[in-house]
Amino acid sequence: VQLQASGGGLVKPGGSLRLSCVASGLTSDYYNIAWFRQAPGKELEEISCVSNSEGTRYYADSVKGRFAISIDNAKNTVYLLMYSLKPEDAANYYCAIGLGPDSSCNRVGMDYWGKGTQVTVSS
């Protein structure tokens, strides 16, 4: 299983970005894909997760109302739309996948991780 994250970059405060995470080599028809982020000197934070089978979504309070996660099952791709970006959103963003119908949408439930994509929010 491989995950490829992309879409990071430099954006001004208040701006928007769309991150993509493409999953390949999947070994299950059921999975959860989550986005995490880590800023220098800070702990890894789970910010959003989606189930491909149930469509349920999770958002951390820090991004609720500003970020939106969506999934294209035909492409095995998850998108993270980020609006109203703040300097504190700057971090390395990672996507991860938990496989199987019993997988959970949290760090412990993730089986594979992709490499990060850097988001910088600065004027």
Image (tube, rainbow, N blue to C red):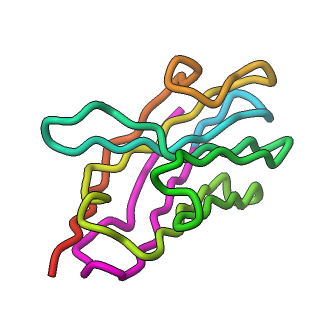
Q: Position of residue 96 (x, y in %)?
A: 50, 36
Image-quadrant location for residue 89: bottom left
Which quadrant would the N terminus be assigned to in this image? Answer: top right
Q: Position of residue 36 (x, y in %)?
A: 42, 41
Q: Position of residue 25 (x, y in %)?
A: 60, 37
Viewer-proximal residue, 118 or 46? 46
Left or right: 118 in relation to 103: left
Image-quadrant location for residue 87: bottom left
Q: Residue at image x 41%, y 53%?
A: 5
Left or right: 56 in relation to 97: right
Left or right: 62 in relation to 73: left
Q: Residue furthest front?
A: 61
User: Would you place residue 4 above or below residue 20 in this image?
Assistant: above
Image-quadrant location for residue 71: bottom right
Magenta region: 1-23
Q: Residue at image x 36%, y 82%?
A: 15
